[in-house]
Image (tube, rainbow, N blue to C red):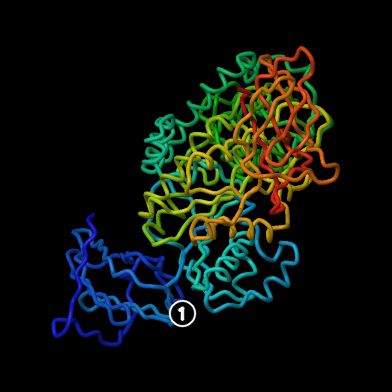
């Protein structure tokens, strides 16, 4: 669909009468109280009758657009400077008219990510007082709500409308986004529109468009399954089940017989049938695959009936079998499972139910009331599985990697959140983007290094904003503190975030590593997160080029006699002792050790142990690192890993 633009003048201008009734001519992102992006042509679009002529009037500026054969139309209105004077937009096509009012011209920022960006203002530190002071007629808020779809939509939910910032509207809005916007509003002095498009627990793959993932490569089969699911859910689910089976065959060949009814499971341990497995001793932190088995005895008359296996919810992915026959697969930690049992599967006497359960983080297993688990028979009777599972640990997620997620499932699918929450917004004019996500992808940092730049490019393309600033929050500390070097998935992903920003001059990294807690994945100090994002926005988008809005980052690491010298991009301060903590050197065998460090301005000198061949240096390489290295701006040095030159 081509963008068309027609401006009318003088006597040729179309006269606009007061609308008799609103009609859905405008796309759903255009509502009362919206902020339109300043200093660039204003894209306005919607749907009218096929081939209709659409006339627009934005407080005196008039334009025309031609709807295509499906009724879709787009117009570009002239760029305008910022104004706090409310404007009115009227759109007319034939007998239909729609008017929206109290529009401002300013800067629009799209905030997105998972739960730490979703985290509401009311829960933040001092949130009640901050919300009470949130009233500002020149700050406007839009929450998209949660929508996951296997295909793109151009519609937001009816309740997703622009609202003026107040206690009531800001209370449940993204705290980090709100604080960022407030800082921008104070610094730039123009109206600010903030869009909150967030969903807790979501993976980055779900926020990239289908074409964006296809261009990236590696997701073709999942996208094909998603396309099948959009047309025929049964076919799509069957194809995904086959993908899951191939993954299981590769990572746990030892379990090939564990679903069979004649397999001897008497040596397996037991667990209650209605709890997450993390409540069992030894499984408190287990993420991966565990097999569950139980038995049910049926009469000949019962075995001859149609039946449904009901298991309640399974966290997160299950593949379920009855007497060795696979009856279904599903994903969703709180989705109740109900699978039709094919005729001829049941038999009089002993019947075995087996479940391959895969947990990808927290909880785990078939939970919910034990009384709800069993075979529901056609005559209305119910044969329960009992109160106990026999179980066997199969594989750990750290060894197998992630299983193929059901690509249609919101938060862990492919493109479904982009389809439902980003596609309806584009190409709305924006100043820039703010992103806080990554916790759901910590097990795949290498892939994240491909995905993060792909998402940035995908969104800039969708919003016709090729140079728009993209601000990213670096993951906060979370997880156990350690006293010796080791593997850290969180540190690996933080370093990917650092490298992504280092490669793109129009991106910025707001580190939150010093704001976290080993015990809470959701740090409450969202004010500091928002201020750090705001500082980056002012530097990248508002001309404050001299503003130092980031903490120290590495430039190089080089051998200098008996030392390795790390050069930072700015002078640093080591609080507490004057000596930086958390530096490691690693050899070619990936054996790492903490080393003494001294600080001299922008240089950190590391003492190399005698006879030790250091090939790389790490800093703050832990899930919850102890940091004492900061910039003069009191922002933390970024964790990193660098080769020694």
Among the 4 quarters of the image, the one containing residue 317: top right
Residue identifier under label 1:
84
In this view, the residue in front, 388 or 172, is 172
Q: How many marks?
A: 1
Percent across and percent down for residue 160 are: 49, 66
Percent across and percent down for residue 639 are: 67, 38
Helix, strand or loop status at disc 1: strand
Percent across and percent down for residue 355 are: 64, 28
Residue 131 lies, with reference to residue 478, above or below; the image says: below
Among the 4 quarters of the image, the one containing residue 375: top right
In this view, the residue in front, 401 or 590, is 590
| Name of the residue lying farthest toward the left | 12
The reply to whether residue 529 is in sight is: yes
Percent across and percent down for residue 124 are: 71, 62
Q: Quadrant of the N terminus?
A: bottom left
Q: How many other residues sit within 10 Å of disc 1, few (<14), some (14-19) or many (≥20)?
A: some
Judged left or right of residue 384, residue 581 is: right
Residue 165 lies, with reference to residue 120, above or below; the image says: below
Residue 12 lies, with reference to residue 263, above or below; the image says: below
Judged left or right of residue 251, residue 293 is: right
In this view, the residue in front, 600 or 573, is 600
Residue at (26%, 75%) from the top-left corner?
Answer: 56
């Amino acid at each position: 669909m081509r963008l068309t633009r027609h401006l009318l003048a003088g006597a040729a201008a179309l006269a606009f009468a007061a609308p008799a009734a609103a009609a859905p001519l405008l796309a759903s992102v255009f509502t009362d109280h919206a902020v339109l992006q300043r200093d660039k042509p204003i894209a306005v679009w919607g749907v009218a009758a096929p081939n209709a002529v659409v006339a627009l009037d934005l407080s005196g500026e008039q334009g025309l657009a031609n709807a295509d054969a499906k009724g879709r139309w787009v117009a570009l209105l002239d760029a305008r400077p910022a104004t706090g004077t409310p404007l009115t937009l009227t759109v007319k096509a034939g007998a239909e008219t729609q008017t929206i009012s109290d529009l401002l011209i300013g800067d629009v920022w799209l905030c997105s990510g998972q739960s730490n960006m979703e985290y509401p203002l009311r829960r933040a530190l001092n949130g009640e007082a901050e919300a009470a002071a949130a009233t500002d007629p020149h700050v406007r808020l839009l929450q998209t709500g949660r929508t996951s779809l296997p295909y793109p939509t151009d519609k937001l939910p009816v309740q997703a409308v622009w609202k003026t910032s107040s206690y009531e509207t800001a209370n449940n809005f993204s705290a980090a986004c709100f604080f960022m916007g407030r800082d921008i509003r104070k610094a730039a002095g123009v109206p600010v529109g903030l869009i909150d498009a967030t969903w807790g627990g979501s993976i980055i793959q779900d926020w990239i468009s289908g074409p964006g993932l296809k261009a990236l490569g590696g997701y073709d089969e999942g996208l094909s399954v998603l396309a099948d699911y959009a047309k025929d859910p049964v076919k799509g689910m069957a194809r995904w089940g086959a993908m899951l089976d191939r993954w299981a065959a590769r990572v746990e060949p030892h379990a090939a017989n564990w679903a069979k009814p004649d397999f001897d499971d008497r040596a397996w341990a037991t667990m209650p049938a209605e709890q997450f497995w993390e409540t069992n001793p030894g499984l408190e932190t287990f993420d991966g695959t565990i097999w569950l088995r139980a038995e049910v005895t049926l009469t000949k008359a019962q075995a001859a009936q149609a039946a449904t296996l009901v298991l309640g919810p399974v966290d997160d992915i299950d593949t379920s079998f009855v007497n060795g026959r696979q009856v279904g697969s599903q994903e969703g930690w709180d989705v109740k499972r109900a699978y039709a049992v094919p005729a001829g599967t049941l038999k009089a006497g002993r019947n075995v139910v087996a479940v391959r359960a895969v947990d990808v983080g927290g909880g785990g297993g078939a939970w919910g009331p034990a009384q709800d688990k069993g075979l529901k028979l056609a005559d209305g009777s119910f044969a329960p599985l009992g109160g106990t599972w026999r179980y066997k640990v199969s594989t750990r997620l750290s060894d197998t990697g992630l299983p193929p997620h059901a690509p249609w499932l919101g938060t862990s699918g492919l493109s479904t959140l982009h389809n439902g929450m980003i596609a309806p917004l584009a190409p709305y004019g924006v100043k820039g983007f703010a992103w806080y996500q990554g916790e759901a992808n910590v097990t795949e940092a290498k892939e994240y290094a491909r995905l993060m730049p792909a998402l940035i490019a995908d969104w800039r393309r969708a919003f016709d904003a090729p140079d728009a600033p993209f601000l990213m929050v670096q993951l906060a500390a979370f997880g156990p503190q350690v006293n010796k070097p080791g593997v850290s998935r969180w540190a690996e992903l933080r370093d990917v975030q650092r490298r992504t920003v280092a490669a793109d001059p129009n991106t910025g990294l707001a580190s939150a590593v010093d704001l976290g807690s080993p015990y809470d994945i959701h740090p409450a100090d969202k004010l500091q997160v928002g201020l750090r994002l705001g500082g980056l926005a002012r530097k990248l988008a508002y001309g404050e080029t001299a503003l130092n809005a980031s903490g120290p980052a590495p430039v190089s690491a080089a051998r200098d006699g008996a030392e390795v010298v790390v050069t930072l991009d700015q002078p640093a301060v080591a609080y507490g002792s004057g000596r930086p903590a958390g530096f490691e050197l690693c050899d070619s065998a990936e054996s790492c050790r903490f080393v003494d460090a001294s600080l001299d301005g922008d240089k950190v000198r590391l003492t190399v142990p005698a006879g030790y061949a250091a090939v790389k240096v790490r800093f703050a390489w832990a899930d919850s690192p102890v940091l004492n290295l900061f910039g003069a701006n009191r922002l933390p040095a970024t964790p990193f890993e660098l080769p020694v030159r």
